[in-house]
Amino acid sequence: MKKKTILLFVSVFAYCYLFYNQGIGINFLIFNVVLVLASISIDFSLVKRLNWLLVAAGALITATSAFLYGNLLSVIGNVISLLFLAYVSYNPKSTLVFAFLQSTWTLISSIFLQIEKIFTPKPLKEGETEETKSEFTFADLLKFIIPIAVLVTFFLIYKYSNPVFSKFIDNLNLDFISWAFVGFMLVGFYLLFVFYFPVNSQRLIRLDESSSNRLSGGILLNEKGMFKDLSKEMSAAMMTFGLLNVLLLLVNVLDLNFIFSGQMKSITNYSQYVHQGINSSIFSVVIAIFVMLYFFRGNLNYVVKSKQLKLNALLWISLNAILLATCFHKNFSYIMDSGLTYKRIGVYFYLFVTFIALVTTLFKITTFKSNWFLIRYNVWSLFLVLVFSTLFNWDKLILEYNIKYKATIEREYYLFELEEVSYAHLLNYSDKMPHNDNYYFIGLSEDLFNKMLKVRIDKFMEKHQQKDWRSWNLEDDRIVNEILKTRKYFMKHPVYFNN
């Protein structure tokens, strides 16, 4: 049997054993190690490919984060990493953006293309027969599925048409057959089949190979655009960047004056001011990048006035960088004023990714790079930032920061927004913390809050006890130990615990 086929069935077994009826834990790390080692065993030369090493490292890092923290962010990062790994393992020369497109295409089309292969089989090689053919196809699986499907169909027909047979079946104990598990296994088989036997889109491969990171090196007569006359396009570009520079300079001057004059502290709706300002600023920078992508897509890089145009564009990039810096300051001031939350941490990541996009745009303009260069490197930056973001236990960082610097945050925020990580702290200090009797329009009296906290803790502890080693992660273990440490102290308050 072909090595890939053996690895496929081993991986399906590992998938079912590690994940069926399990949560987030060490199972993610073990499964990712299996897939990485399987990829290396198929093609050992992958360890010499930088892009494969980075994607494999991303998969293992996010899987380790899942084991450490057991959070959704690490799972999202890991799924995306494995999506990249699937195709980069198959085609190490593929760039990340095309690996994503190819993997997505494979997930969507694989089952239809495999069915098509059954009816239009691949011609046999010289000296090869159907029995000796080494390639594993969907038909190899179908030769087992069709007889089983026919058997099940007639089984159901006889069961509902023959009372004697039906009574015989009813007396049998078939509880060991779990249709939920069968469905889970089939989904896992399909996903792993796609991992080991990806489908190539030749059009995407040709586009990837033909799309250079550098511009053509001269003026192209057939370049597509809104202007047929290059001089008119240059005039439009100069006017666009000139007007936008004046406008953005005015915005930055007014913004900086507003910040450093102390007027920002007098704002009543601080949250709305910060969110609207940051969202619109990031959106404007993204639009700015698209404008530059259009005007610097080719020919304008080589005309006589290209230097003046580039100076205007570089000035605009600099003004956009200042805009991002003011957004950074606003978000920092907002955190100092109102505490740390997921969204406020997310703003820093958005600003960082946007800043990287500005830097790569600057590099593109000054070094005659193509738009594909910008797309490829920014997809890499998004991926690496996502992997980096999984390295931190954000729940714990938010809790510890707010406890230390923002004691005015209501206990309801911790109960509804941070949940498990804050349980021990709420057990110890909820009666001393500020509270909001109308949080999310939910009126919570002292007694109702304590009962709700007790229910949530009991549910968390019960769920933790039901887990086995496959779902074990360090963060849940730490939270449980913190809760248990409070038990003796709160034994005189049985509202917190089950008898």
Image: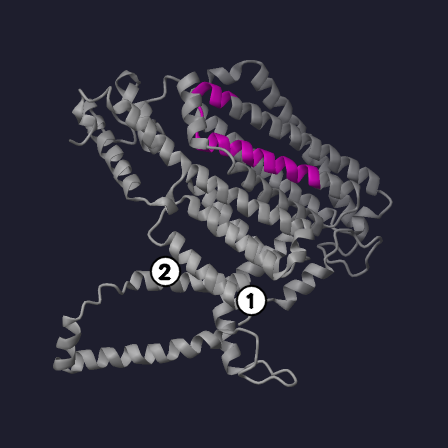
Residue 362 lies left or right of residue 328; in this view the side is: right
Q: Quadrant of residue 38?
A: bottom right
Q: Residue at x 71, y 54 (%)?
A: 226
Q: At label 2, which amino acid type do we have? A: Phe
The residue under label 1 is: 3
Q: In terms of secondary structure, what is the magenta stretch mainly? A: helix
Residue closest to the eye, 361 or 22: 22
Q: Which residue is mark 2?
A: 184
Question: Where does residue 426 sit, x and y in percent of width and height?
Answer: 30, 24
Using residue 88 as the reference point, say whether residue 361 is left or right of it.
right
Q: Which residues are magenta?
A: 333-360
Cα–Cα span, label 2 and label 1: 24 Å
On the rendered structure, is 494 left or right of 326? left
Q: Could you say where residue 337 lies in the image, as x and y percent from the top left? A: 45, 19
Residue in the image at 33% along x and 45% along y = 468
Using the image, determine if residue 16 lies above or below residue 485.
below
Residue 186 image offset from top left, x and y in percent: 39, 65
The answer to whether 142 is drawn above or below residue 438 in the figure is: below
What crowding class fits label 2: few (fewer than 14 Cα within 10 Å), some (14-19), or many (20 or more)? Answer: some
Residue neighbourhood size for the residue with mark 1, other residues' Cα within 10 Å, grouped as few (<14), some (14–19), many (≥20): few
Between 453 and 233, which is closer to the camera in this rendering? Answer: 453
- Find out whether residue 342 is within the magenta segment: yes
